[in-house]
Structure formats: C-alpha cells, structure tokens
Image (spheres, grey):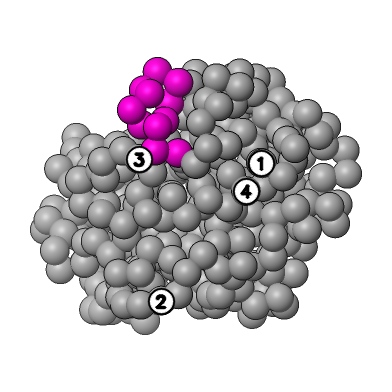
C-alpha cells in the first residue's frame, strides 16, 4: 500500500529515492574530470546525470569521443566527507566481485586527498518503475534469490554484518533521548523493550553470504532480461535473508507488496529463525525511526522523509510480528 500520493516534485523525489542534489559533470573540478578521461583513454563529449540515490556526488553516463560509453561516480569531501569513504569502500568491494555476479563491472577507481571517483561499464537499463509493477517485483525477487545463492559462501573477505557496534542502535538511542521518543506512536514508545530486542541483532544476522545491505529500487537496474544490483559500499557478510528483509519496507512504501506477504512466500526465508528475524527487523526499524527524527545531513534535505516512510512500513511489520 502506498503511504501517500504524489503532490509535487518534492514528494516525487522523496518517494522515488531521489536526493536531487547530484553534481553534474561540468561542475566537477578540472582535475577530477581530467583524471577520469585519462583513466578511460578518451575525452568525454556528453554526460547524462542519473538522479537516483541520495549521494551529493556525480552519477553520470558518459559518452566518449571514441564512441564508447561508461558510467562514472565521483564525490568531493567538501560536499559530504563520509561520501568519499563510501566511494572508496565501494571500489574495494566492486573490484573483487566475481565476474558472474549481476553487478556492473568496475573499470577504474582513483582519487585524491578529498575526492574519490569510480568508472564502471555502462549498462543500458533503468530502475524499476514506481509504483512497483508485479512483474518487475517478481523479476527482482527471483534475481535476489539467485544473488544470495551465488554469493554463499561469500567470495569476498569482508567483515561480518554487525561488526560496527554503532550501527542499528536506534532504539537504544531513543531510550537515552526521551524527548525524541515522546513523539512516537504509543506502541513504539516502549523503547526499552525494543532496545533489548535490537541489541542482539548482530548475532541474529550472522551468516556466510555476501549481502549488499542497501537494496532499494534506486540501486537496481533492469536491463533487458538482466537484473543488476548497483552501489555496494555497505556490503558485508551475513545471513542470506538479510537483503530481502532490509529491502521490503522500501518496496511496500513504493507501492509493492506487503512485507509479511513476501516473507511468507520467499524461498530465502525458509531456514530463517523467526526470533532472529524479529531482532534484525527491530534493529532496521529502530534505524529508520531514530534517523527520521534527526536533522537532515547537509545537502540531503529529502533523506529524513524517505527514512520516515520506510520506518512506518517497518514498524507496522514489526508490530504485526510481535503481537
């Protein structure tokens, strides 16, 4: 079920997962543009910015003077310092993905003290139409099942999904911030109970599958018969059902099926321990709910509302499981 209607450009950007603050090719520093052109061995004659996602950096399909096309990402630390770290981490992950994984192939990565850039093969595809079409969702779900199988055991040596103790601690943060917790709906104000449930999520999410850990419609490309998963900076090793669980709130809020309905029918969940699922879902919900109450990061004015909409769906799913 959709959580609202499109009443203007701002709402559409939020609902579609568009930050609306991309840097365009011509706005990059000359040094960055030159580095990319040297890396690809040709000058750029046309650049089409891709709006999806919330990064303030470049994301553009580039047409080169020699006729080739590539996709480039670049960001400066002056816009958002942590985005540089994300780009560098993505380069480390994408460069080690096996050739058979349904993700664009990394061609080059580089950077300086305060910027990072990546160049991928260009994919002539598009993100899923929103609201989700049933046929597109079935395609993506089937591809996600295949992806989990292909990435088990993980072909890349990465930390376990819960290695960062500060990640997914939203309910514990709310327990320490009563003023924020007071604005929550009555059921969610039992933050101590939810914080206790959340605390065990790293062990609950453990496994030996390489998981993307940031799947949404804007990180998926439909290209002919292929489904490709893009943007891997948050990849880690965990349970094979984690990506599906983390994606379902965004699917629901963007017009797709209800999370519980997908969960009951998916082959990814057959061996999932219900208690472990509750812990990871509680942690994901806490992340969305707490984050949505914080001030927006610089330049990311639509992010908090996007998190709030996902949090509403996640909270409804969690509440139905804990009754």
**CB within 8 Å, label 4 to label 1:** yes
Residue 67 occupies quadrant: bottom left
Which mark, residue 293? 3
Label 2 belongs to which residue? 6
Residue at position x 70%, y 55% in the image: 259
**Magenta part of the chain:** 174-184
Disc number for residue 316: 4
Q: Is residue 179 magenta?
A: yes
Label whose residue precedes the other's in the sequence (2 or 1)? 2
Q: Residue at x 81, y 34 (%)?
A: 274
Note whether 154 is above or below 7 in the view shown. above
Asked whether disc 2 touches disc 4, contact meaning CB atoms under 8 Å apart, the reply is no
On the image, numbered disc 1 is attached to which residue?
A: 318
The residues bearing labels 4 and 1 have C-alpha atoms spaced at a distance of 6 Å
Residue 8 falls left or right of residue 254: left
Q: Nearer the viewer, mark 2 or mark 4?
A: 4
* Above or below, comparing residue 303 to residue 62 in the picture: above
Which quarter of the picture shows residue 153?
Answer: top right
Classify the position of the N terminus by image quarter. bottom right
Q: Secondary structure at mark 1?
A: helix
């Amino acid at each position: 079920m959709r959580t609202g209607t499109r009443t203007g450009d701002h709402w559409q950007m939020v609902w579609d997962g568009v930050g609306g603050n991309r840097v365009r090719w011509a706005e990059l520093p000359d040094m960055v543009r030159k580095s990319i052109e040297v890396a690809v061995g040709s000058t750029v004659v046309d650049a089409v910015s891709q709006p999806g996602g919330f990064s303030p950096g470049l994301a553009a399909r580039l047409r080169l003077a020699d006729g080739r096309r590539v996709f480039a990402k670049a960001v400066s630390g002056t816009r958002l310092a942590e985005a540089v770290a994300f780009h560098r981490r993505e380069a480390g992950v994408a460069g080690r993905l096996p050739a058979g994984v349904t993700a664009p192939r990394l061609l080059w990565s580089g950077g300086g003290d305060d910027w990072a850039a990546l160049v991928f093969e260009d994919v002539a595809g598009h993100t899923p139409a929103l609201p989700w079409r049933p046929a597109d969702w079935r395609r993506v779900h089937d591809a996600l099942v295949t992806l989990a199988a292909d990435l088990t055991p993980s072909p890349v040596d990465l930390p376990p999904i819960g290695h960062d103790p500060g990640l997914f601690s939203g309910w514990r943060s709310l327990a320490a911030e009563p003023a924020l917790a007071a604005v929550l709906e009555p059921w969610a104000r039992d933050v101590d109970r939810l914080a206790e449930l959340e605390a065990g999520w790293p062990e609950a999410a453990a496994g030996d599958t390489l998981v993307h850990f940031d799947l949404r419609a804007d990180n998926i490309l439909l290209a002919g018969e292929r489904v490709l998963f893009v943007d891997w900076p948050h990849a880690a090793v965990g349970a094979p059902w984690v990506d599906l669980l983390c994606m379902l709130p965004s699917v629901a809020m963007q017009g797709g099926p209800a999370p519980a309905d997908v969960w009951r029918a998916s082959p990814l969940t057959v061996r999932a321990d219900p208690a472990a699922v509750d812990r990871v879902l509680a942690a994901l919900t806490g992340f969305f709910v707490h984050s949505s109450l914080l001030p927006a990061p610089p330049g990311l004015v639509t992010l908090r509302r996007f998190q709030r909409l996902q949090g509403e769906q996640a909270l409804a799913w969690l509440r139905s499981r804990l009754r």
